[in-house]
Image (tube, grey):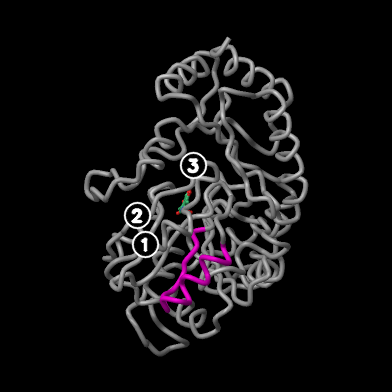
Amino acid sequence: MIYVTKSFLPDLKEYVSYLERIWQTNHLTNDGPLLLELEKKLAEYLEVDHFIFVTNGTIALQLAIKALNLSGDVLTTPFSYCATTNALIWEKCNPIFADIDPQTLTVTSQEIRNKITPSTNGILTTHVYGNAGDLEEQEKIAKDYNIPLIYDGAHAFGVRVKNKSIFSFGTVSTCSFHATKIFHTIEGGAVMTNNAELASKIKGLRSFGHKEDDYFDIGINGKNSEFHAAMGLVNLSHFPSIRAHRKWAVTRYDELICSPVRKVQFQDNLERNYSYYPIILPSESDLFHVTNHLLAEGIKPRRYFYPSLNTIQIIQGEPCPISEDIAKRVLCLPLSADIQEEDITRISSILMSHFQ
Ligand SMILES: Cc1ncc(COP(=O)(O)O)c(C=O)c1O
């Protein structure tokens, strides 16, 4: 079976060389040397002042929301993985959905301006598939209304916009390093910010709400371990070649897949990370037909992201016609660090044969 993604595993010897260091220090978790090394390297690589390694990308969102004391209405995207909306609801916020652009699938700044009201306390939107909206305009809106801007950058590791790390935009950004992500630490995630006060608060909340031996707040356990940090340190050295292979694969798909199948339009000034290969089919029945055909051939694409989050039963948000329409027709094709030419050719040919 070829799945929508395949976790990258480095040579075992490379990982073991880091494990040997854990056995030498006997430091397994709680800010161990490997974790501190990973945090330092990733802060530099991702051009952020503060990089806080946490248990996963969902806890990263919850810590960011909590540290900013967000409550009440928060403007958000309906086109993302459910973790984005879940985190808001879990933290007792009220998600207000702003619709997306049909080409880039990110929330438009115009929609944010249209939906913002005096009760909006923050914005949380997603760099979906590693794409970006108009980040400078969004920063301006947040500043005009004096509200924080959180970016869920779970898909955006290594993306650059206007020659700057995508994580340098907004009040705070998060990322997921889950095993299926382009850069992973098995399980893991991060909160990133250039605000020292916020970073210090998040670090405390990550560790039960205490600083040194004193408690200062109600916190949670969002810490991550030396074993996860070790996987991150190894995988970081492979990231350039992983990205290069995925770039090649995306280029091949782009050559073989054409109209009436539509592709996502990435921003002009954005350096991609090639984390997903989403396609938009003409109709939902085309999507079912193509999926069944691929499954019969041992290929498993995924409906990333379905359904549109404003339609989830417990939420029943206001309509977002573009997101609802796209979510019904979007499918991610297999993409991984070692996908082969023959797989891409076969997948593309099964897909395109549906339209002949
Ligand atoms: C957009 C988005 N946000 C958050 C998450 C949650 O990340 P994690 O699985 O590390 O908790 C994911 C996971 O895939 C995601 O796609």
Mark 2 crowdedness (10 Å alpha carbons): few <14, some 14-19, many ≥20: many
> Which residue is more in the foreground, 127 or 203?
127
* Magenta segment includes 167: no
Q: Secondary structure at mark 2?
A: strand
Question: What's the magenta region?
Answer: 135-152
What label does residue 110 carry, if any? none
- Residue picked out by circle 2: 97
Give the residue at mark 1. Answer: 75
Q: Secondary structure at mark 3?
A: loop
Q: Position of residue 88 (x, y in %)?
A: 33, 61
Residue type at mark 1? Leu
Q: Residue 126 at what x, y percent from top left?
A: 48, 55
- Quadrant of the image occupied by residue 117: bottom left
- Cβ–Cβ below 8 Å for labels 2 and 1? yes
The amino acid type, in three-letter code, at marker 2 is Phe
Q: Earlier in the sequence, mark 3 or mark 1?
A: 1
> In front of the other: label 3 or label 1?
3
Figure quadrant of residue 68? bottom left
Q: 131 or 113, which lies in front?
A: 113
- Within 8 Å: ligand 1 and the Cβ of disc 2? no
Q: Which residue is mark 3?
A: 102
- Spatial separation of the CA atoms under disc 2 and disc 1: 6 Å
85 sits to left or right of 204: left
Residue located 40% across and 50% down the image: 99
Dots 3, 1 in contact, CB < 8 A: no
* Amino acid beneath label 3: Pro
User: At x 48% / y 24%, what residue is drawn?
Assistant: 282
